[in-house]
Image (cartoon, rainbow, N blue to C red):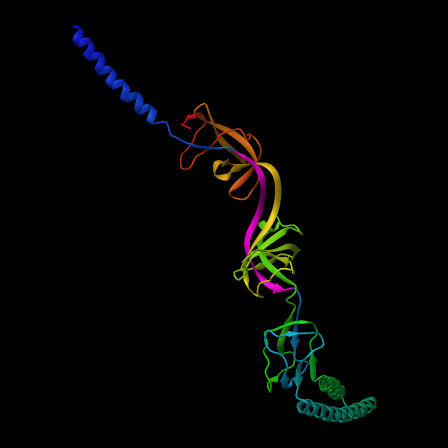
Amino acid sequence: MTMKRVILVIFVIICGIIPLIYFKGSKIPKVRTIKPTISKIESSILTTGTVEPQSQTIICAKAKGVVDKVLVDENERVEVGQEIIIFDGEDALKRLENAQFELKQAKIDLLAAESLFVKKMGLYGRQEVSKEEVEEDKSLYKRALLEKNMAEEEVKLATEHLNNLVYLAPQSGVVIDRKVLPQQYVLANEVLMKIVNLDNLQVAVNLSRIDVKRIKLGQDAFIKAENLDKELTGYVKYVEPEEEEQNRLFSKIIIELDPSKELPEIKERVEVRIILERKKDVLLLNSDAIFKQGLQSFVYLYKNSRAVKRVVRVGITNRNQTEIIFGISAKDKIILPGKLKLTDGMKVKG
């Protein structure tokens, strides 16, 4: 073989090897690495709730009658003892007169029924009437006695109604859900209005059984309302017993709001963030770098141009970051895999 041919062969071999080496190198994936940080972290539950008053009074009609005057408007503030509704006295007086007449008649009927029953008992003792006839008159006497008692109760209620035509506010607060108007005829126990205390509001939140297990009294909560610029602060005041709604078990959580801040509207739907746990000066890692396999958590370290699997123990998380209790240090380079599928010992470029 001539020197010219030898040189040509060597050139061909070199031209074939160089692309092969380059192609092999290009197959090694490039990865992004991050380092853990030492900082503070808090875990929380994000949900929604409804603003409601801590205390409210429902004003109901004590008896049927006609409303003469309504002295307060919707959303008006009232003080305890303030006049709010006046009922028509003529109607109440007529009711009392009717009740007294009915009572008088019931007493007459009772005396007649009692006299007949006593007479029948005497005849029965002489075996001049049957037991069935006695039982029938006894039933009539009992019915007359019941009607007399009912008539007495109506007189009592009518008297109370006449003496209480003016309704007073039982608490200070704001009038809401006013349903009554002047000259309106209302029935006994009909709801007329509500008075709520707007100085102390709370937020009611429904949580599932799993989330409720993480709730403790006194935990901080932050409330975000649509019409307020800043988050409101509060705390978990009460956890009500578990209930069932639409085949789903839940518990109602009551969060008391700080009364010194500007408060949202009653019945407003608000965002709620309940703080479950806080920690300071802990090792944190981007949650996307942590893998789970069963109960085990692990990460991939970038070491000597390879992905090295390392088991870690995790603590609390806030979805973006996770506390690392042990397994890595702040000096370690951790691979943030993205869509890359990593395996232990796999060659990578940093």
The location of residue 324, given as percent across then percent down, is 56, 35
Residue 20 position by quadrant = top left
User: Where are the magenta residues, as a range?
Assistant: 36-53
Check residue 226 for magenta coloring. no
The location of residue 283, given as percent across then percent down, is 57, 35
Q: Magenta part mainly helix, strand or loop? A: strand
- Is 147 left, or right, of 44 in this rendering? right
Q: Nearer the viewer, residue 86 or 96?
A: 86
Q: Quadrant of the N terminus?
A: top left
Residue 233 position by quadrant = bottom right
User: Please, is residue 347 above or below residue 113 in the view?
Assistant: above
Q: Quadrant of the C terminus?
A: top left
In the rendered image, is residue 132 in sight?
A: no
The location of residue 115, given as percent across then percent down, is 80, 93
Residue 166 position by quadrant = bottom right
The residue positioned 62% from the left and 60% from the top of the image is: 261
User: Please, is residue 326 above or below residue 107 in the view?
Assistant: above
Q: Nearer the viewer, residue 103 or 258?
A: 258
The location of residue 82, given as percent across then percent down, is 70, 78
